[in-house]
Image (cartoon, helix red, strand yellow):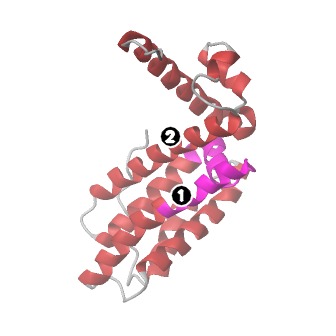
Amino acid sequence: MAYRRTPAVQARLDAQRAAVLQAAVALLAERGYAGCSVAAVAERAGIATGSMYRHFAGKSDLAVELFRTVVGREVAAVTEALAREETPQRRVAAVVETFAARALKAPRRAYALLAEPVDPVVDAERLVFRRAFRDVIATQIAAAVDSGELPPQDAELTAAALVGAIGEALVGPLAAGDPGDTIPALTAFALRALGAPEAAPAHRAAQH
């Protein structure tokens, strides 16, 4: 007869897994992916290295779940920010501003998400990450085109180009640790690229 975990045992395992991911998120912000070895995460989480394999097959499996966790938070943050704006054009500005501000506030984590060399399975997750932001922006571009705020364009293509350009533009400031005027410059660039008649910067949201 197959062993069946009791609810109490499952609850303990779920709590341990959550603690492991929390430890991995903290290490990512401090050391990047290179510092998120199975042993390092286990030590930060306060468990034996062997216990990690109850939850993850290895570092790649852990890194993929870590990536998804962090990206989910970033997508949630920009979605919350754009929801506070009244027009599609301002919502696009809110996405750019919020994403850039959060990246520059946590440069090591942002560099890991955008550019740090990683395992191929994690690199594949980067495509999912970019598509998620592309889709958020594309929805707002399409709405702005429909409302006449922006000229006709391929919303998905424009959004994909913006995501690539913004990510590339952030790599330098992230590496240098000097944000300068990056956020307003990126917001202005994005609106010009969309064909906006004038800059419409979003209200600066408080970053958490």
Q: Quadrant of residue 181?
A: bottom right
Which comes sooner in the sequence, label 2 or label 1?
2
Location of residue 104 in the rendering, given as x and y in whole percent from the top left corner = 58, 49
Give the residue displayed 40% in from the left and 63% down from the top.
136
* Residue 167 position in % (x across, y down): 60, 62
Which residue was labeled with disc 1? 128
163 and 105: which is toward the camera: 163
Instruction: Please give the label number shown on residue 111.
Output: none
State whether residue 36 is above or below residue 161: above
User: Which amino acid, by three-letter code, is at mark 2?
Assistant: Thr
Viewer-proximal residue, 75 or 82? 75
Could you tell whether 132 is left or right of 146 in the image? right
Mark on residue 69? 2
- Magenta stretch, main secondary structure class: helix
Read off the magenta span: 104-131
Q: Is residue 199 magenta?
A: no
The quadrant where residue 4 appears = top left
Secondary structure under tag 1 reads: helix
Res. 53 image quadrant: top right
Label pair 2/1, CB-CB below 8 angstroms: no
